[in-house]
Amino acid sequence: MNDKDLIRIIKKHKSLQMLMRCYKEISDDIAVIKERDPAARSSAEILLLYSGLHAILAYRLSHALYKRGYHFAARFVSQKARHLTGIEIHPGAKIGKGVFIDHGSGVVIGETAIVGDNCTLYQGVTLGGTGKDTGKRHPTLGNNVMVGAGAKVLGPFTVGDNSKIAANAVVLEPIPENSTAVGIPARIVKRDGKKVHTGDDLDQVHIPDPVSQELCRMRIKIEKLEKKIKELEQ
């Protein structure tokens, strides 16, 4: 066996290892979706039809290109994936294992964002910046974090392990581990299984509606002002 044959065998072996690694990653991703999405009926359905899975697969390719310095090619892949899936993940972001993007439309993950293992993101989630920071500009999610539909997590802080962010919440400050945060701006209503403020455990439906609350406060103020005007007129 000469040197060329040896090199050819080594390259083939590396290619097989890479294929096996890719196969395992995709199999693990499918298993995660089956576990968390009751609507998932088969592996084929998930592989062919789930935009969240497609976005993660495209991200892995773009991230690999990004780490090797092929920034234009990386952005090209990520933007093509955005057009196909409605999910925009910057190739510079760091995403752990077992991440599930459910539905996914409108999800945006910024360049310096970090997403830990086994996180779940629903549609309309933004892991973004405020425009005031340089360097690390986007949030870090710990492991097993759930971010509800439409929630915005903005800034270079950390959301602790096992925490939950309610649908439509706007998070501007760090969230401790094992916490539940709701509202605009988000406030912690439960930590380590104990209530911090009034509010039930997060179910993404029975949470305070900040818009309705603000309209109610404005209506009360208007009624008071109208009453004072009538008194002055009399």
Image (spheres, helix red, strand yellow):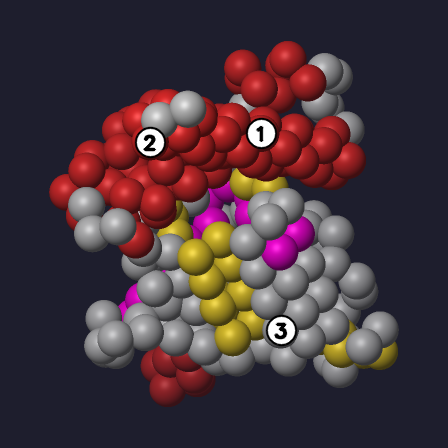
Residue lying at the far left of the rendered structure: 72
Residue furthest to the front in view is 1
Q: Is residue 42 left or right of residue 87?
A: right
Q: Which residue is mark 3?
A: 160
Instruction: Give the secondary structure at mark 1.
Output: helix
- Packing grade of label 2 (10 A; few <14, some 14-19, many >=20) is few
Question: Residue type at mark 1?
Answer: Met
Q: Which of label 1 and label 3 is nearer to you?
A: 1
Q: Percent from the top left, x then y, of residue 182?
A: 61, 66
Q: Earlier in the sequence, mark 2 or mark 3?
A: 2
Q: Position of residue 170 (x, y in %)?
A: 47, 65
Quadrant in which the C terminus appears: bottom left
Alpha-carbon neighbours of circle 3 within 10 Å: few (<14), some, or many (≥20)?
Answer: many
Q: Is residue 194 above or below residue 35?
A: below
Residue 117 - label:
none
Task: Give the number of the disc on residue 3.
Answer: 2
The percent coordinates of residue 167 (x first, y second) are 58, 53
First-in-chain label (1 vs 3): 1
Residue beneath the point at 79% across and 62% down: 201
The numbered mark at residue 20 is 1
Magenta stretch secondary structure, dominant = loop
Q: Quadrant of residue 232?
A: bottom left
* Distance in Å between CA atoms under marks 2 and 3: 52 Å
Q: CA distance from mark 1 to mark 2?
A: 26 Å
Query: Of 37 and 118, which appears nearest the observer?
Result: 118
In the rendered image, the residue lying farthest to the bottom is 232
